[in-house]
Amino acid sequence: MTEIIGSPQTDPTPSPPEPRATDPASTNPATTDPPTIEPAATDPPGDGGTAQKARRVNPARRLARTVTDPLLRTQRLDNWVLLRSGVGALVMFWGLTLLPDLADLYGSSSIVPSQGPRAGQFSVFRWWTGDIAVGVVLGLAVLGGLALALGVAVRLAAPVAFVAVTSLMASAPLMLNGGDDVLRLLLLFIALYAVIAPADGLNTAVGRLGLSEPPTGPPWGLVVIRIQIIAMYIVTVMDKMEGSTWLGGTATVRALNLQSMRRFWVPEFMLTSSAAHNLMTWGTLATEVAIPILLINRRTRRWGIVLGVGFHAALGYVLRLGLFPATVTIAYLAFLTPAEASAIVGWVRRGADRIVGLRAKVPSPGTDQADDP
């Protein structure tokens, strides 16, 4: 606060001269300097009122500092590195899933033959079209995701992967779902943070967390993703409350009765019981209301992560939702603390070492153990 208020050592007011009692000239009014009177603390400021003005802290500036200081303060970024690797692996897998249907989605006889994005959408295919362009852009998306997963040239790989994925999504809108939108937003925020944030250790491999110097930087990149995920649930609930099927308690059973949407077996009573219909429908709404409330509060954030992961895992088991459950689950990594992210990586590392150690102890089939004592 001394930088805002100021310190007494920098007060520009001169000190009054000490009187000289033994000097005869000090009693002569003509030669005696008038004493300097310092203004009291309650007096109005004289020439500028430097000290008093410094004490007057602008409320707007104080509020701005209260909001921005936690976002710009340097901290460990173990959770950001874990999120970056997860998103990179998901981007790489997303790109590889396009290969079997690449001609149907982007070829000359595809479902959307133009390969052109809609008005206002950004896409490389606005300037470069053709099969070669599709192959190059898809390759850049897969390579960018691999680089993010491994932690190689992250500041370059993140924007390249975002541009490639955005171009592919804009040119095949019929294949998109909510998971693709979430993935694109995660890539956008990671790319922005990688390009402009003054952070160290962005290229840290996820396997090195807890073993080497931790990455550090401002946490605003994670905060933006947290806000996006919380807003996703709020907007979803608001949209569902406007539909008659959700208010009527029949929305979930309508989806379950679609054979093209159902993934695995579900009990028969879930399809025929009206009580089960209402329970699943209103339970879904209650869960989507509870998740953001739990995620906002730091004390209940772990419960929100557990509830959200379980909820989306159940949806992914019952319905064909593409990569949406996996994408949202990876987005939950943004809500971990750096210590929690490092602990998860350490737990996985110890488990892998234990498995490797057990395999090393198992003798091969051709090993002769007859000579063992």
Image (cartoon, rainbow, N blue to C red):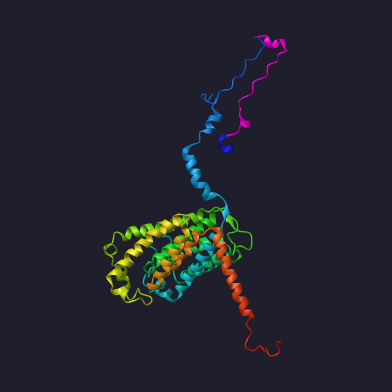
Which quadrant is the C terminus positioned in?
bottom right
- In percent of width and height, residue 337 lies at 53, 58
Q: Could you say where residue 362 lies in the image, as x and y percent from the top left?
A: 62, 82
Q: Magenta span has 8?
A: yes
Q: Quadrant of the N terminus?
A: top right
Depth check: give the residue in front, 97 or 105: 97
**Residue most toward the front?**
373
Q: Residue at x 64, y 23 (%)?
A: 15
Q: Residue at x 61, y 29 (%)?
A: 11
Who's the residue at 61% across and 31% down the image?
Answer: 8
- Residue 236 in the image: x percent, y percent? 36, 60
Q: Which image quadrant for residue 216?
A: bottom right
| 288 with respect to 149 (left or right) | left
Q: Quadrant of residue 21?
A: top right
Q: Nearer the viewer, residue 76 or 89?
A: 76
Q: Residue furthest right?
A: 22
- Please state the horizontal and vertical placement of residue 123, each as a whole percent of the image: 44, 62
Query: Is 133 rendered above or below residue 299?
Result: below
Out of 17 and 165, give the one closest to the viewer: 17
Residue range in magenta is 6-28
Q: Is residue 127 visible?
A: no
Q: How many marks?
A: 0
Q: Is residue 330 visible?
A: yes
Secondary structure, magenta segment, majority class: loop
The answer to whether 373 appears left or right of 225 in the picture is: right
Q: Is residue 213 magenta?
A: no
